[in-house]
C-alpha cells in the first residue's frame, strides 16, 4: 500500500511558472484505491456534472500545477484510474442519456453512464449492449478508454468496434468530434488510450437487437487445457458467447481442466413470451440466496475458501458438479449470465485486506496452449495459485494500443498478502518472459506489474512513438496522467 503523503506540486507545471501556484483545497483530498485493493494513494478528487464544470476543473488543476487522472467506475484492477498526489476527475456524475433511437439501436450518452444503467435503459425496447464486461458497474467512458471486451470478443471484437462517434475534450478545453471518418487517428488511439489523449464527454454506440430477454446456455466440463481449446474452436462459429473457468490447482495431465459456458441469443419466435422475458424485473437475481441468505453478506462465507486448501476444495467440487449429468442446457436472463459477480456485492473483500492483483495475458492461437500450460505450472511451482482463472477467445482489432490477438486470454487473480506481495511481482516478471516469447500482449485495465521494457517489447517502439506524438498534439502540456502512465510510459 502506498504511503499517504502531502502532495507536492507537479514537476512539469512548477518548472513552467515562476508564480506560486494556488494550493488545492484539502477537503478534496481522498484516498483513491485500485479496484483490486492492492494499491491506494491520496488525490484531490473532483466530480463535475457538466462539461463546463469539467473544463473548470482542468483549468484549476493546470493553474495549481497538478496533473489530471480520469476515473469512471474505478473498476480497473490496478492503477489505471489513480493519480496519486494529483487531481482525479471522477466522471460518474456526467451520466445522462442524450439521445436514444429505439428503431436503429443507436444511443448517445455521457461518459459516466454505467453498463447497468445502459442495459436497463435499452432492454425493454429489445436491445442489449454489444459488449458486456463481467461487472456492470463500469462506465461507458472508462470502457471506451480501455476498449473493453466481453465473452463474445471472438465474435464482435471489443467495445471500440461498436462506437460510432465520440466527443473528446482536450486538455485545452476544446472539444473535438471523432469517428472512423473524422479525426480518425485520434478515434483509433483514444479508444484503448487509457484516458491519456482527452476526456470522452459523449459517446455514440450501436446496440445489439435481441428478440428475447433470455439466452440459450450450455455448460460442460473439459478434462484439460487441450479439451478447453478444442471446445472453444469447435464452437467459435456457432456461439455468441463462450467463457471457461479453469481449475488453477489441477496439475499434470489435468492442467487446465475446468468448466465452459457458452450462450446464444434466441432467434425471433423461439421465446414464447419475449415481452415478459425482456422486462427488467425478470432479469435480476433476488436479494437472498436460496431465499434466505442476504447476498450482501455472501463474501463473508467466501472468505474461508480463499486459502489454497479451500480453493482446492471449491475447484474440485465445481468440476465434479459440472461432471454430474454431463452437458447441461438451460435458458438464463442476460443479466444473470453476464453479471454473476455483481450479485455478490463486495465479493473482492473475500480476498482479505491485501486485496488482489489480476494478470491477464493475450496470446496468439498457435502458442496459447503451451504458454498457458507453462504459466499455470509456474504459478503452482512458485506456490502462488490463482484464485479465479478465466479463459476467453479473442479476435484482433485496429486500435493503436490494442491488447487483443487472434487467440486466447487467461485472466488470473492472485490474492495479495504482506508475505507474498514481492513474490507475486517476481512471478509476474517470469510470466512476462513466457508471454513475450509466445508473442503475447497485456491489458492495462487489469495490469499492476507491467514494466516499460515489457510494454516496449510487445507494443514496439513505432507504435509507442505514434501514441506519444498524438499525446503531444492533444495534450501538449502533459496535463493528463495516471499512476499507470508514469509507471509504464513516464
Ligand atoms: C469484476 C470485474 C470484471 C471485469 N470484467 C471485465 C471483462 O469481462 N472485460 C474487460 O475488458 N474488462 C473487465 N473488467 C475491467 C473493466 O471493465 C475495465 O477496467 C474498465 O475500464 C472499467 O471501467 P470504469 O468505468 O470502472 O473505468 P476506470 O477503471 O475508472 O478507468 C479506466 C480507464 O479509463 C479512463 N477513463 C475513465 N473515464 C474516462 C473518460 N470519460 N474519458 C477518457 N478516459 C476515461 C481512466 O483514466 C482509466 O485509464 C472487469 C473489472 C472488474 C472489477
Image (tube, rainbow, N blue to C red):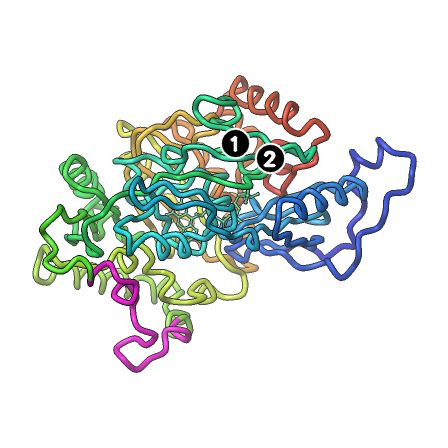
Q: Which residue is mark 2?
A: 198
Q: Which residue is mark 1?
A: 190
Q: Is residue 277 magenta?
A: yes
Residue closest to the eye, 359 or 471: 471
**Quick one: SS at disc 2?**
loop
Residue closest to the eye, 297 or 281: 281
Q: Is residue 151 left or right of residue 327?
A: right
**Residue 377 can be seen in this image:** no
**Is disc 2's CB within 8 Å of ligand 1?**
yes
Region rendered in magenta: 276-298
Question: Residue 451: x, y in percent?
Answer: 56, 35
Which residue is at 71% across, 53% downward?
44
**Residue 169 can be seen in this image:** yes
Q: Is residue 242 magenta?
A: no
Q: Check disc 1: other Cα within 10 Å, few if <14, some if 14-19, many if 20+.
A: many
**Quick one: SS at disc 1?**
helix
Tag 2 and tag 1, C-beta contact below 8 Å: yes
Question: Residue 182: x, y in percent?
Answer: 49, 22
Which residue is at 18% across, 36% downward?
236
Q: Mark 2 or mark 1, which has the lower sequence index?
A: 1
Q: Check disc 2: other Cα within 10 Å, few if <14, some if 14-19, many if 20+.
A: many
The answer for how far apart the CA atoms under marks 2 and 1 are is 7 Å
Q: From the viewer's perspective, is residue 176 above or below residue 308?
A: above
Question: Residue 106: x, y in percent?
Answer: 36, 40
**Is disc 1's CB within 8 Å of ligand 1?**
yes
Q: Is residue 317 left or right of residue 118?
A: left
Question: Residue 80: x, y in percent?
Answer: 56, 44
Amino acid at each position: 500500500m502506498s504511503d499517504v503523503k502531502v502532495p507536492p506540486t507537479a514537476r512539469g507545471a512548477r518548472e513552467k511558472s515562476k508564480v506560486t501556484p494556488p494550493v488545492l483545497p484539502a477537503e478534496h483530498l481522498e484516498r483513491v484505491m485500485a479496484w483490486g485493493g492492492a494499491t491506494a494513494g491520496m488525490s484531490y478528487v473532483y466530480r463535475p456534472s457538466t462539461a463546463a464544470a469539467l473544463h473548470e476543473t482542468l483549468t484549476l488543476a493546470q493553474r495549481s500545477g497538478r496533473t489530471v487522472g480520469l476515473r469512471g467506475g474505478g473498476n480497473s484492477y490496478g492503477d489505471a484510474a489513480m493519480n496519486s498526489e494529483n487531481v482525479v476527475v471522477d466522471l460518474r456524475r456526467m451520466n445522462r442519456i442524450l439521445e436514444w433511437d429505439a428503431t436503429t439501436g443507436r444511443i448517445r450518452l455521457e461518459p459516466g453512464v454505467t453498463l447497468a444503467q445502459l442495459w436497463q435503459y435499452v432492454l425493454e425496447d429489445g436491445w442489449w449492449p454489444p459488449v458486456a464486461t463481467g461487472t456492470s458497474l463500469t462506465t461507458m467512458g472508462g470502457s471506451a478508454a480501455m476498449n473493453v471486451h466481453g465473452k463474445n470478443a471472438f465474435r464482435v471484437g471489443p467495445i471500440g468496434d461498436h462506437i460510432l462517434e465520440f466527443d473528446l475534450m482536450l486538455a485545452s478545453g476544446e472539444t473535438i468530434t471523432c469517428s472512423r471518418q473524422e479525426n480518425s487517428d485520434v478515434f483509433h488511439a483514444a479508444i484503448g488510450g487509457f484516458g491519456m489523449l482527452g476526456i470522452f464527454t459523449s459517446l455514440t454506440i450501436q446496440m445489439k437487437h435481441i428478440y428475447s430477454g433470455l439466452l440459450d446456455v450450455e455448460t460442460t466440463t473439459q478434462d484439460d487445457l487441450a479439451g478447453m481449446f478444442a471446445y472453444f474452436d469447435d464452437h467459435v462459429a456457432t456461439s455468441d458467447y463462450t467463457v471457461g473457468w479453469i481449475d488453477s490447482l489441477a496439475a499434470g495431465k489435468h492442467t487446465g481442466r475446468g468448466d465452459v459456458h457458452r450462450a446464444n441469443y434466441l432467434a425471433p419466435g423461439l421465446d414464447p413470451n419475449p415481452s415478459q422475458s425482456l422486462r427488467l424485473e425478470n432479469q435480476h437475481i433476488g436479494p437472498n440466496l436460496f431465499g434466505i441468505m442476504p447476498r450482501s453478506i455472501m463474501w463473508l462465507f467466501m472468505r474461508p475458501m480463499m486459502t489454497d486448501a479451500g480453493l482446492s476444495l471449491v475447484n474440485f467440487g465445481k468440476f465434479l458438479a459440472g461432471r454430474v449429468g454431463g452437458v447441461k442446457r438451460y435458458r438464463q436472463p442476460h443479466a444473470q449470465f453476464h453479471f454473476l459477480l455483481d450479485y455478490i456485492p463486495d465479493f473482492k473483500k473475500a480476498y482479505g485486506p491485501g486485496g488482489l492483483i489480476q494478470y491477464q495475458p493475450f496470446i496468439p492461437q498457435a502458442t496459447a496452449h503451451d504458454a498457458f500450460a507453462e504459466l499455470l505450472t509456474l504459478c503452482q511451482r512458485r506456490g502462488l495459485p490463482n484464485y479465479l482463472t478465466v479463459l476467453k477467445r479473442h479476435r484482433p482489432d485496429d486500435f493503436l494500443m490494442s491488447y487483443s490477438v487472434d487467440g486466447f486470454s487467461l485472466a488470473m487473480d492472485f490474492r495479495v498478502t504482506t508475505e507474498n506481495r514481492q513474490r507475486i511481482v517476481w512471478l509476474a516478471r517470469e510470466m512476462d518472459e513466457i508471454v513475450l516469447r509466445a508473442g503475447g500482449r497485456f491489458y492495462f485495465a487489469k495490469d499492476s506489474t507491467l514494466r516499460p521494457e515489457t510494454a516496449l517489447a510487445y507494443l514496439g517502439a513505432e507504435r509507442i512513438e505514434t501514441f506519444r506524438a498524438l499525446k503531444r498534439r492533444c495534450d501538449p502540456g502533459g496535463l493528463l496522467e495516471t499512476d499507470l502512465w508514469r509507471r509504464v510510459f513516464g
